[in-house]
Image (cartoon, grey):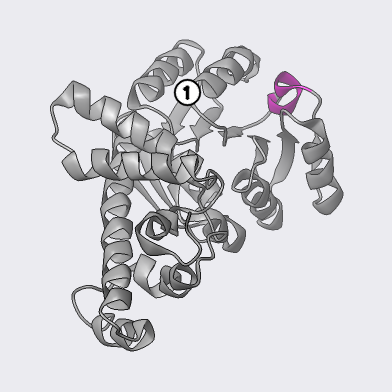
Amino acid sequence: MARCAFLGLGVMGFPMAGHLVKAGHEVRVWNRTAAKADAWASRHAGQAAATPQAAVAGADFVFFCLGDDPDVRLVAEQVIPAMQRGAILVDHTTASAELARELDAQAREAGIGFVDAPVSGGQAGAENGQLTIMCGGSEADFARAEPVMAAYAKAASLIGPAGSGQLAKMVNQICIAGIVQGLSEGLNFAKRAGLDPAKVIGAISKGAAQSWQMENRWETMVAGKFDYGFAVDWMRKDLRITLDEAGRNGAELPVTGMVDQFYAEIQDAGGSRWDTSSLIFRLDFPGKG
């Protein structure tokens, strides 16, 4: 059993912290909105802390699942000095690789370990304990953190040194952006061609076009239901980070940049909280406009 602190109880963090309790770990949580931490504590055999510093006191592992770089920096400034030496900070936030390297340096100076560990799998993956985790850090820190993260992960991989997990998550989002746009165009094409989408998907999902997005989202996309996962606002945040990194390393991301602007159109249409499959809306959804 490990003593854990979990900071950030959004749609991902809330169930992830719960899985730590179910795995037998001692868990103390903190959330910027205290009511959410209290709600978590009322459902799980853990404690809610009033401050980040109180949450991490005496913890062997501290987990972040926050919003963006500024949120992580603000909380880290309070938390790293309050952590005990030898503990490990694991950041599940999807953030910049630059920030991950900053936190790694700060952690080393404070005598603690650090792993950047963004996740993939969405809300359903968090609730079912089936997340995929891409990690950056030392082999020693990863080896200590991986058995604890296993409470909510189906797979966790060490990609390389600090920042590598965040870079791998950027690759993940690049691939997803193109797949969802392609699926949206394909479904729209099928409709305009007078085809039955169910029959088309039944045929092509057995071949090279198959994807998780196709298997899990085609029906809701055709029905115009977009309340099933990762929000457009968060995807645009991730793509912003990805495009910024590409600007530094020289990678060309024409499709990713285009899809980012398509998501901006979805935001303008009132779909900020729709899931990422809502790209189909801008093409031809009944009732559009």
Residue 55 lies in the magenta stretch = yes
Would you say residue 237 is visible in this rendering?
yes
With 84 as the anchor, is 207 left or right in this view?
left
| Main SS class of the magenta portion in the image | helix
Tell me the magenta residue range.
51-56
> Can you give x and y, in whole percent of width and height, for residue 225 in the image?
54, 65
Name the kind of residue labelled 1 in the image: Asp
Residue in view at x 56 percent, y 27 percent: 87
> Can you give x and y, in whole percent of width and height, for residue 1 in the image?
66, 47
> Can you give x and y, in whole percent of width and height, for residue 40 in the image?
78, 46
Query: Which residue has dot 1 on it?
Result: 69
With 116 as the anchor, is 254 left or right in this view?
left
Residue in view at x 53 percent, y 52 percent: 274
Up the image or down, 209 lies above or below 92; here it is: below
> What is the secondary structure assignment of the residue under circle 1?
helix
Foreground of the two, 137 or 268: 268
Counting other residues with Cα less than 10 Å from the Cα at mark 1, is it few (<14), some (14-19), or many (20 or more)? Answer: some
Would you say residue 138 is visible in this rendering?
no
Residue 128 lies in the magenta stretch = no
Q: Quadrant of residue 193?
A: bottom left
Up the image or down, 42 lies above or below 22; here it is: above
> Can you give x and y, in whole percent of width and height, for residue 41 in the image?
82, 44
Residue in view at x 40 percent, y 21 percent: 99
Q: Quadrant of residue 27?
A: top right
